[in-house]
Image (spheres, grey):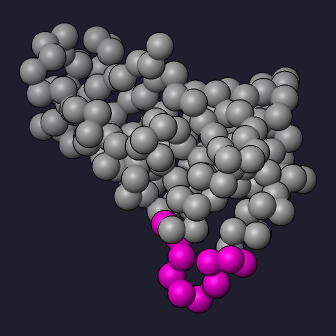
Amino acid sequence: MAGYGVTEDPTGLLPWEWAEQKLVATRNYWLVTADTSGRPHSMPVWGVWMPDSQRWGVGCASTARKTRNMRTNGRVVVTNDDTVECVSVEGRAVEVSGTQADTLIGAWVEKYHDGTWPRGEMAEFLRAGVTFEVIPERAFGFIERPEEFSTAATRWIWD
């Protein structure tokens, strides 16, 4: 990222734990999908970062544009809602079912349950739709403050 004044010196780069804390704590994420022609679609969504599996999960209505897009073009971007301390994850969305979906749904219900909607109804709501996990390929972390950006902008890559 030399064009942005980012140093090649690894001193001060952000640890993955910093990014993971941001992803776990985020309530409203941005999910960017694209259809087969490349037409982008960006929507705020609830989702859950699952540290044990290094996956991000989301539930969607089966008729939603994002669902249609992810079924035909799995390339997605997920970001937290903070533009000053930002984490942007690029990856591949895969539809999950069975045990994988149950794990995602359980984590989602645990995160968003606030007592106003019974847990069982929340889980059934998600089960009535489609669940996807995003398998990360690379991620970027930025602290968008002038004194920190050039030394803290970090990229992580998964094999």
Answer yes or no: is residue 115 visible: yes
**Which residue is at 19% across, 10% downward?**
8
Query: 7 or 63: which is nearer to us?
Result: 63
Q: Quadrant of the N terminus?
A: top left
Which residue is located at x 33 percent, y 34 percent?
Answer: 141
Q: In the rendering, at what x and y percent does residue 25 appear? A: 38, 58
Up-down relation of residue 143 to residue 135 (above or below):
below
The magenta span reads: 111-121
The location of residue 89, given as percent across then percent down, is 49, 34
Residue 149 in picture, x, y percent from top left: 22, 33
Q: Residue at x 45, y 54 (%)?
A: 81
Q: Nearer the viewer, residue 104 or 34?
A: 104
Against 27, residue 104 (above or below) is: above
Is residue 25 placed above or below 133 in the rendered structure?
Answer: below
Q: Position of residue 38 (x, y in %)?
A: 78, 25
Residue 71 is left or right of residue 78, and the answer is right
Residue lying furthest right: 63
Q: Is residue 105 left or right of residue 34?
A: left
The answer to which quarter of the image holds residue 97 is: top right
Q: Residue pushed farthest front? A: 99
Residue found 78% across the figure and 61% down from its top = 127
